[in-house]
Image (tube, rainbow, N blue to C red):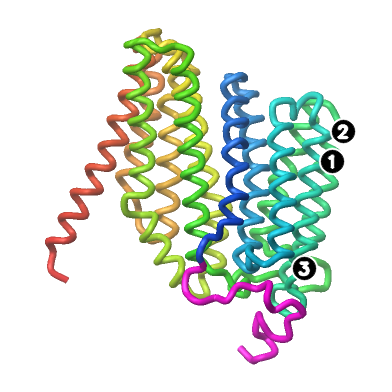
Amino acid sequence: MTPSESPIADLAHPRLLRGRQGVEPTTSTELFFDLVFIFTITQVSHYLIEHPDWRGAARTALLLALVWFVWVYTTWVTNWLQPDQGPVRAMLIGVTLGSLLLSAAIPQAFAGTGLLFAVVYVSVQVGRTMFALWATQGSPWLVDGFQKSLPWIGATSVLVVVGGLVDTPAREVVWAAVIVLDVVGLSIGYPLPGRERSRPERWMVEGGHLAERCAAFVLIALGESILVTGSTLTSHVNLVTSGAFVVAFAGSVALWWVYFARSASAATEVIARAGTRTGALSRLAFNYLHPVMVAGIVVTSAGDERLLRAPGAAATTVDALFTLGGPALFLAGHAAYKAVVWRAVPSTRIAAALVLLALIPAGVALGAPVAACATAALAVTVAVIVTDRLRARSAAREPS
């Protein structure tokens, strides 16, 4: 790489770019930005709780994907820019305000607040990208990436507004098309006529920072699940619901343990040292696979709410899908994450996800109580944790 190709050569605003000295720390400005998404995940979870059918699930997935795009693309921008510098901090505060308005519009996003949701989404996505383009002037590689992504973001933004203007079910179709185009555009490098695609090895990504930021979002989702169960418990406090709360809390702890006990810190190290693979690896691991795990937590949170409301009731299909399917989705997403990062088959997580899926029709057919389904999900997740620890001890005893 020649000096003229350096990402910091001839920068118009050099103080706005991160220093790139090891894993970049998460700043207080970024953490303040994250706080809004506690409210966001709560809104998404309550939407699923209030619409416990296939259409509600599909709409919840659309909303989660769109708000994830807002968060993860902002996180990519702060991977390159220094959040504690005044202009970047001002941009982040603006995105924080926009994200708060976006979250407030979620409950009626497919009704009266659809256009508000669309306008705020477009303002955040386009405004942040244009700011990043200005802030990185003089860095050929970074400017090139933002120049190529901006037309794609502008095109999908038009579709988001169109979706806000039409009624359902057309709104769902248009917003689903936005998600598909966004994923495809990023996957193929935002191609434009007469220009080379944006290649991930040229993105100058600091993978360790992205790994830590996405781990923080998983913590946000888990914290929200505890908030939902705690709120439900306060309106139904007795011995039975207290026992159900313990099961729900233990389930959240188990999901946290699966993600954070060993793999989170190890994944940070692997991705930080991935070299030219960092961009492509980060795109797959963080943009595509982490929202699957977050979705699993959201579904589990909805299941915990139903558990606390009627722990002894015979599980319906919805109850079983929430209480067993949520952890299965989380474990499947984490299995894919481990497979991508370590290039190994995470057989324990795959097997656990399949067992949980098999238990869904079995629990419904047998009329098992909701508490029994939740306990079974907890037992399967704990089995994954125990297997991980046994394998780690076995590996530690083996000679180098």
Residue 3: in magenta span? yes
Q: Amino acid at mark 1?
A: Val
Secondary structure beneath label 2 = helix
- In percent of width and height, residue 364 lies at 40, 14
Q: Main secondary structure of the magenta part?
A: loop
Residue 365 appears in the rendering = no
Q: Report the residue marked by disc 3.
A: 133
In the displayed structure, does residue 251 sit left or right of residue 67?
left
Q: Quadrant of residue 252?
A: top left
Q: Tell me, yes or no, whether the two marked residues, 1 and 2, touch with CB atoms within 8 Å.
A: yes
Neighbor class of circle 1 (other Cα within 10 Å; few <14, some 14-19, many 20+) is many
Secondary structure beneath label 3 = helix
Foreground pick, 238 / 106: 238
Which residue does the image show at 44% across and 23% down from the upper left?
304
Mark carried by residue 161: 1
Give the alpha-carbon distance from disc 1 to disc 2, as whole Å: 6 Å
- In percent of width and height, residue 276 lies at 52, 75
Residue 241: in magenta span? no
In the displayed structure, does residue 329 sit left or right of residue 351?
right
Q: Earlier in the sequence, mark 3 or mark 2?
A: 3
Query: Which image quarter is the C terminus in?
Result: bottom left
Q: Is residue 139 above or below residue 372?
A: below
Foreground pick, 142 / 127: 127
Give the alpha-carbon distance from disc 3 to disc 2, as whole Å: 29 Å
Q: Amino acid at mark 2?
A: Leu
Residue 4 appears in the rendering = yes
Secondary structure beneath label 1 = helix
Which residue does the image show at 69% across and 77% down from the upper left?
141
Give the alpha-carbon distance from disc 3 to disc 1, as whole Å: 23 Å
Which residue does the image show at 82% across and 35% down from the upper left?
116
Mark carried by residue 165: 2
